[in-house]
Structures are given as C-alpha cells and as structure tokens.
Amino acid sequence: MTIKTAKLSDPAVRAFVTAVNAHDRDGFLHLLAPDATMADDGADRDLADWIDREIFSSNGHMDVENETDKGRSLVARYRNDAWGEMRTRWTFTVEDDGRISRFETGQA
C-alpha cells in the first residue's frame, strides 16, 4: 500500500517527493539548503552528481509505503531506469527555514 504524496506529513519532504516524481530538477534544487549533503547506503556522495544520475537522468520515481519521525523518515519503493525498482529508506534533516540540509537513502 502506498501513501499519496499529498498526504505526506512534512511539507519539505512532501515537496521533495513531488519534485522527484515530476522530474522537476529546478523545484528539487530550490528545496535544498545551499550547503545540503546526502548519503547513499551509508557513504556520502556528491549531491549534484548523484541527483543527476540517480533521479533526473534516469527517471527516478518514489512510491512511499510508510512514514515515521513526523514524516521525515520514509520507506519507499524507488525505481529508475538504471537500477529498476527496490525498497528504500529515506531520512531527511529539515532546517527551520523549511529547506532540506541533508538526506540519506539506501536499501531498506
């Protein structure tokens, strides 16, 4: 069962998932703090390179199955043209201004 994106609890996370699924790179980048960082499977990655490769050039898409931590932790089925579909976990650090300063993902 999936949670409709519009029903996700945290506004920044909801906007993140919306931008990913709409392939809206500019909208996605607007959500991030200027010094935002990310990690994939526990290793820090170059943010610009990762989002281009794993989301925008490969048609990334998230179907959220579960949320915890007031909407800042997700379990989602993530798919893209490079890897197919896998069950993933996502955690977000959202600053007081509503921008995402860090996100971490990996297989769930």
Image (cartoon, grey):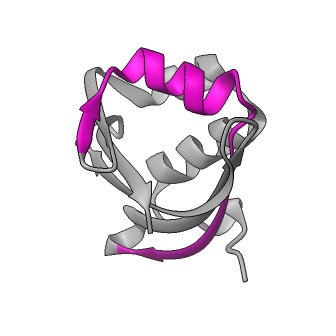
45 with respect to 61 (left or right)? left
Question: Camera-side residue: 60 or 71?
Answer: 60
Q: In this rendering, does residue 30 appear at all?
A: no
Q: In this rendering, does residue 83 appear at all?
A: yes
Residue 76 locus on image (x, y percent): 58, 65
Residue 3 locus on image (x, y percent): 67, 73
Q: In which quadrant of the rendered view does residue 68 lie?
A: bottom left
Residue 56 against residue 100 in the figure, above or below: above
19 with respect to 33 (left or right)? right
Specify whether residue 55 is painted magenta.
Answer: yes
Residue 47 locus on image (x, y percent): 37, 23
| Residue at horizontal 46 percent and vertical 25 percent from the top | 50
In the image, the segment drawn in magenta is: 43-68
| Residue at horizontal 43 percent and vertical 16 percent from the top | 48
Say which quadrant the N terminus sits in: bottom right
Question: Camera-side residue: 77 or 41?
Answer: 41
| Residue at horizontal 72 percent and vertical 68 percent from the top | 4
Say which quadrant the C terminus sits in: bottom left
Residue 99 against residue 7 in the figure, above or below: above
95 with respect to 76 (left or right)? left
Residue 36 against residue 101 in the figure, above or below: above
Residue 81 locus on image (x, y percent): 76, 37
What is the residue that sits farthest to the front in this orientation?
A: 83
Question: Camera-side residue: 96 or 40?
Answer: 40
